[in-house]
Amino acid sequence: MLEIKGNDFLLDGKKFHIYSGAVHYFRFLPEYWEDILIRLKLCGFNTVETYMPWNLHEKQPGSFDFSGRLDIVRFLKTAQKLGLYAIVRPGPYICAEWDFGGLPAWLLKDKSLRIRCMYKPYTDAVERYYREVFRRIAHLQHSSGGNIIAMQIENEYGSYGNDKKYLEFIRQLMLDSGSTELLFTSDGAEHNMLSGGTLDDVFKVANFGSRVPQAFGTLRQYQPTGPLMCGEFWNGWFDYWGKDERHHSRPAKEVADELWDMLSMDASFSFYTFCGGTNFGFTSGANFYDLYMPDVTSYDDDALLNEWGGYTEKYHAVREVLLKHQGIEPQPLPPEPERQNIGRVDLTESVSLMDSLDEIAVKEKSDFPETMEYFDQNSGLILYRSRLKGNYLGRLYLDGLADRAHVFINGSLKGIVYRNKKDCSLGVGTLKGDNVIDVLVEDMGRINYGPKMIEGKGVKQIRFNLQQLNGYDIFLLPLDNLERLDFSKGSTAVPAFLRGSFKAQPGKSCFVHTDNFKKGYVFVNGFNLGRYWSVGPQKSLYIPGSLLKEENEIILLELDGFKFKSERFVTVTDIHDIG
């Protein structure tokens, strides 16, 4: 097992350095795991590190899923077959620019919820999840013949809280559940983070992306002896939606120079990320400082391998340093994943979302607005319908809007309200008689970092000036049943679903470009690729080749309207545009 002696790691009694790269199995389809891990090994790494997303593994309380791209056992065994060790970070919170930081949405049904502390309903749920996790992966620990050599306690806890009883609870729960390997905490290389997020007798690592000597110097004040390790070396960065945003990138030489600094200090490290992958469906998270900042669908992260597994200049620069340092002779690299160019795909059929509520929505009744989570909906859209009688003049307010709403009056779109607007209101003029008010709210990703994470999706209150509106039909739209759509209706009023078909070579990846559209989602053969938005910086969505067949269906849900009414088509090419 992995042990600490003096300032060194010992693995099975021999000095060992952890040269790790992060690969999140859940951000890839399993058909690509082995290819990515081979490239990790050939780059000079000896370990793979991964988070575990609680919200995918337990989508409803007590119902667990470890199949398909959630099959962590298969992922870890694939890594072991290739000679790679593993570090597992089971959460319960993972951050990772992932929806709600990996915490399940159903926790938010509890209106008294507290997270990442000793709130009993929360810790009871964590305990149930951890017991299930260790039931599945305990046998993959190194002491049992597997490749897991270390596990993390919580995740960057000092960025959130300082409840040492909670950290100790997580540690003891891991031990009681069957953990036998080295446990560690990881926090940013800042005094407040290391003060709040560490336990005295637990190994500590620091997370940073630059100024290696200074970062390790700060860590040494909390851990005077023991091996130095950077738990997350931020070799790239993530993107969020915004008209003034650009894709983040970092020069390869700068990363290589920082790597040399770590190696010269005899340090271990884990590159975050080696290959970032994709926030498929509704899985992307968001940050919130002064404004809500939702993350884009691509988790390219300016990593060593790009989103679709292609080599970058950074990969080659890091590989040169790592192989030279270890005295490893370079081996031939496998070719990049194959791509294909499809061309124009016409979207010849359409049906309005409002005309499809009977087919794809679940209808509930409520005296007042409730969030998605109240109705056990994890993600998607939610529609609030109320009726307003009388004579009204003024503004409609959407209090607690999360995140973006289309407001319809008597079936006509009145406007779009985004939560970053100062008062989340809309002028609607004069209304007389009987009127139907529809508020369609889009979930754009739960906050994954900081003090504002506890927030349901939808709207808390709808009012006309100061008057609350009561009495609602609420339509739940998780968008997981589009096979029920009736395109024979032929309606085109937005939000609208548009459908087309295209031929492809199975196994070859490509990218769908949505230049003729404004904002929405793309589904290929029933699989939700994720969100597009014309504000950028991301301009195309990745289609893994393993999703494709000879004949393929593509459906767009366009929320805002078409840029060019006569040009309802997408372009599918072999070029990825992430801005």
Image (cartoon, rainbow, N blue to C red):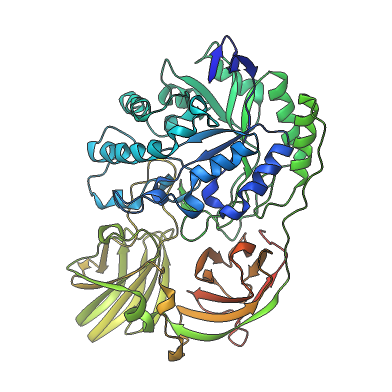
Q: Is residue 302 visible?
A: no
Q: Position of residue 570 (x, y in %)?
A: 63, 76
Q: Nearer the viewer, residue 487 or 432?
A: 487
In the figure, 295 relative to 167: above or below?
A: below
Residue 154 showing in the rendered view: yes
Image coordinates of residue 565 in percent, x first then y, are 58, 86
Viewer-closest of 251 and 50: 50
Return the residue found at the far front. Answer: 145
Question: Residue at coordinates 73% horizontally, 71% vertically from top-left?
Answer: 341
Residue 25 shown left or right of residue 117 in the figure = right
- In the rendered image, the residue lying farthest to the top is 6
Q: Position of residue 382 (x, y in %)?
A: 34, 68
- In the rendered image, residue 450, in percent from the top left (x then y), is placed at 42, 41
- Compared with 305, 359 (above or below) is below
The structure residue drawn at horizontal position 45% and vertical position 90%, both measured from the top left corner, is 488
Q: Quadrant of residue 78?
A: top right
Quarter of the figure that contains the C terminus: bottom right
Q: Is residue 342 left or right of residue 95?
A: right
Q: Is residue 149 above or below residue 308?
A: above
